[in-house]
Amino acid sequence: MQDTVVAVAGLAYGGAAMEAWRALPGAVGVKLTRLALYPGGLLALALIAALLTPILRGALLRHLWISYRTGFGQSVISVLAGVSVFIALAVFSIWPILHGGPIDPRFGGAFSAYGAGIGVLLAEAILVRRIEADPRMRQQLEA
């Protein structure tokens, strides 16, 4: 589930960024900063914080464990629900640009937030691999 959602979120972001690149006025450097540099930096920051900060890592592990134990993310419906959320967020990111609205000039607006969200999703995908690799947790999941 996590791998699929990370892939869809990345593809949806890429599509929204390409459309924004076409629609946004300004120099290449400004577009690159708002659509790649800021979101990429926040993606890295969110990923590092989620994996290296014990309280955040613990919260994500608990969330993932509960999701696995309740079966969320293990069915086609729950995967489609997760994927739909990220497609909707990509549309939300590009909507103001397509309708003449401004993008936040200070920090990239919704694109930066989307990048941070992808960082958290990537951290979850990494943590799921750790859960699946632990024989005790794997045994409990399969029970």
Image: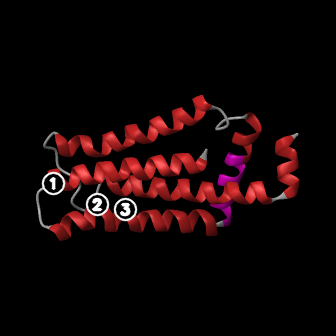
Q: Which residue is mark 2?
A: 35
In the image, residue 53 sits, relative to residue 70, either above or below, namely below
Badges 2 and 3: C-beta atoms under 8 Å apart?
yes
Q: Is residue 121 left or right of residue 96?
A: right
* Mark 2 to mark 1 CA distance (whole Å): 10 Å
The circle drawn on residue 39 is 3
**Main SS, magenta residues:** helix
Q: Residues within 10 Å of mark 3 (few under 14, many from 20)?
A: many
Badges 3 and 1: C-beta atoms under 8 Å apart?
no
Q: Residues within 10 Å of mark 2 (few under 14, many from 20)?
A: many
Tell me where residue 118 appears, x and y as whole percent: 47, 55
- Which residue sits at x=86%, y=57%? 135
What amino acid does circle 2 point to?
Answer: Leu
Q: Which segment did they paint magenta?
A: 54-64
What amino acid does circle 3 point to?
Answer: Pro
Picture quarter with the C terminus = top right
In the image, residue 52 sits, relative to residue 123, either above or below, namely below
* Mark 2 to mark 3 CA distance (whole Å): 6 Å
The circle drawn on residue 24 is 1
